[in-house]
Image (tube, rainbow, N blue to C red):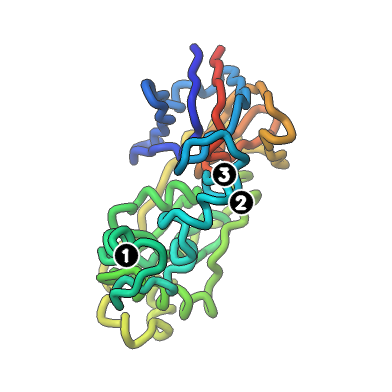
């Protein structure tokens, strides 16, 4: 089987295990069906997710000029506390920013390699946890906008991490934690503006990834340095492919790369 198209973040579907899909312009691939088969990835060109031009990808699937222009790459994406739509104040495009920022957001705890705090739109639960490779997660605050979620995350970062050790996550070197206990421990540090949105009575969500074998020591595939790679797919976790030779490939980190895929 052969596929061709621009890489985007894989779509996911909750299940036991989670189902992964790659979407192309005229086709799609259920990646779970490729497990234990040889997958060849061939880099063909760049295709910016905004302008569509064959320009080197700078960040988040965008060429450099689009990254600093498109509203979907504003600083508030990575730093929710910088959101200003609730003040009717524009960053790059107020209409877009209101659409994204002025909707319910979740502050959560996720355990991928360690416990971390994060923010996502309510509609992105549990997708965000899956993308981070979390094997367990829990909502702790639900706010009406992105700004309140952002300042809550900033306050809690003084007491719990906000980064995932992706290498540790991919080797499955993780411990189960009592996230309900952690939620209650962190409650006193929630800002006054957001404390009314604290979620006091929920349980953690557990996630199962389609992995046949975890790598012992990960080797990252970079398509700029190695434009063609072939290996037996042994698992999918987060947004990563895991291959038999311990090579891992970050699909989301390669958004905007136009590739050919061959499955044998």
The quadrant of the image that shows the C terminus is top right
Q: Tag on residue 182?
A: none
Q: Residue at x 52, y 53 (%)?
A: 67
Q: Is residue 203 left or right of residue 134?
A: left
Q: Earlier in the sequence, mark 1 or mark 3?
A: 1
Circle 1 Cα neighbour tier, 10 Å, few/some/many (<14 / 14–19 / ≥20)? some
- Image depth: mark 2 or mark 1 in front: 1
Sequence-first disc among 2 and 3: 2
Question: What residue did someone put label 2 on?
Answer: 166
Under circle 1, the secondary element is helix
Name the residue that disc number 3 marks. Answer: 253
- Name the one closer to the observer, 38 or 5: 5
Q: Earlier in the sequence, mark 2 or mark 1?
A: 1
Viewer-proximal residue among 242 and 45: 45
Do callouts 2 and 1 mark residues in contact (Cβ within 8 Å)?
A: no
Q: Which residue is mark 1?
A: 94
């Amino acid at each position: 089987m052969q596929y061709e198209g621009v890489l985007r973040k894989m779509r996911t579907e909750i299940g036991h295990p989670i189902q992964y899909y790659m979407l192309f312009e005229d086709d799609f691939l259920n990646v779970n069906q490729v497990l234990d088969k040889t997958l060849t990835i061939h880099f063909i060109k760049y295709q910016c997710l905004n302008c569509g031009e064959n320009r080197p990808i700078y960040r988040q699937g965008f060429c450099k000029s689009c990254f600093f222009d498109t509203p979907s790459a504003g600083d508030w994406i990575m730093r929710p506390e910088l959101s200003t739509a609730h003040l009717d104040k524009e960053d790059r495009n107020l209409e877009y920013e209101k659409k994204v920022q002025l909707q319910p957001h979740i502050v959560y705890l996720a355990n991928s390699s360690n416990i971390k705090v994060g923010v996502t739109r309510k509609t992105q639960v549990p997708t965000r946890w899956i993308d981070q490779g979390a094997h367990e997660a829990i909502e702790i605050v639900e706010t009406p906008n992105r700004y309140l979620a952002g300042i809550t995350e900033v306050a809690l970062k003084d007491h719990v991490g906000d980064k995932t050790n992706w290498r540790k996550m991919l080797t499955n070197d993780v411990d189960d934690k009592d996230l309900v206990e952690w939620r209650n421990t962190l409650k006193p540090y929630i800002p006054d503006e957001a404390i009314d949105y604290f979620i006091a009575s929920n349980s953690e969500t557990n996630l199962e990834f389609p992995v046949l074998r975890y790598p012992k020591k990960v080797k990252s595939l970079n398509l700029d340095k190695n434009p063609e790679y072939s290996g037996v797919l042994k698992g999918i976790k987060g947004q990563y492919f895991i291959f038999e030779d311990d090579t891992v490939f970050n699909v989301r980190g390669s958004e905007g790369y136009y590739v050919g895929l061959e499955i044998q």
